[in-house]
Amino acid sequence: PPTMVVRFSILVYCLALLHHNTVASFTNVKDIRRIYKHTSLDVEPSIVVGGVVASVGAVAWWLGDADNRKKRQQYAEWETKNLEYQAERERLAFVAPRKEWAEHELQQYNGEDETGPILLAVKGEVFNVWKGRNFYGRGAEYNIMAGRDATRFLAKNSLVEENDEERGVELNIGERACLEAWYWTIKNKYEVVGKLKGYDEESTRM
């Protein structure tokens, strides 16, 4: 660390100065030899110069890195606030898992609440898709699927509401394959919070 370099440099400089003054205070050559004999640290001028250079370099580095330290501090503060924000979003969007959900119970979680959970069913499983609020929330492209069984929408790759007659037609093999792909995409992204009550597995079996 820069502080350690500065401290070491100052220590070396002080020892060198003390050594110089001690030697200069003796006029007798024997005294000088005695001092050298009993002195364990013999500081060369190059070491002193090196210490000063290191000190100046350390201070320059410390001052030059000030902007980076400030940016790192700002990033750390932003990251902390972002984690707190995400935790609060998750808390508001939480819904307790159930063993079964009736389809009409999903309706209150249709994305109209801008911070609450968003539920939809696919192939008999109910998912909380609040993390995809930009897809399923109020006014979003796939909001028609929120708060209901979205199985046939996904199978047909359609956002158009079916009439009673169309809903009575079984899905063909291509639509079932398409549904399977969507099902695994959603399952890998969102939390399962239960099963859809009364779901007919045969209606989508491959």
Image (spheres, helix red, strand yellow):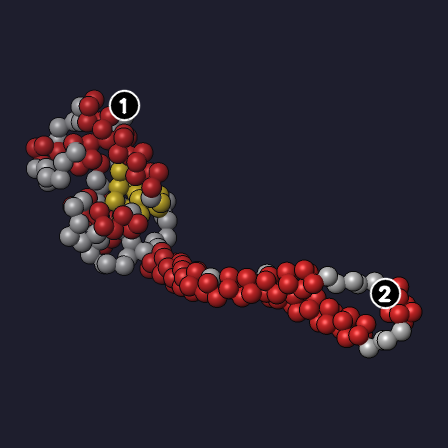
Relative to 121, say whether 87 is above or below.
below
Residue 7, given in percent of the width and then of the height, sits at 65, 68
Relative to 134, say whether 49 is above or below.
below
Relative to 109, say whether 74 is above or below.
below
State the residue position of label 1: 206
- CA neighbours of label 1 inside 10 A, class few (<14), some (14 to 19), many (20+): few
- The image shows a total of numbered marks equal to 2
Please tell me the numbered disc located at residue 14: none
In the rendered image, which quarter is residue 166 located in?
top left
Residue 38, given in percent of the width and then of the height, sits at 88, 65
Disc 2, SS: helix
Cα distance, mark 1 to mark 2? 95 Å
Relative to 91, say whether 186 is above or below.
above
- CA neighbours of label 2 inside 10 A, class few (<14), some (14 to 19), many (20+): some
Cβ atoms under marks 1 and 2 closer than 8 Å: no
Q: Which of 68 and 49 is in front in this view?
A: 49
Residue 11, given in percent of the width and then of the height, sits at 70, 68
Between disc 1 and disc 2, the foreground one is 2
Which residue does the image show at 30% across and 36% down from the upper left? 185
Looking at the figure, which quarter contains the C terminus? Answer: top left
Q: Is residue 57 left or right of residue 17?
A: left
Q: In this view, does 50 lie to the left or right of 94?
A: right
Q: Which of 143 and 8 is in front in this view?
A: 8
Please tell me the numbered disc located at residue 36: 2
Q: Which of marks 1 and 2 is nearer the N terminus?
A: 2
Tag 2: amino acid: Tyr
Question: Does residue 70 show up?
Answer: yes
Tag 1: amino acid: Met
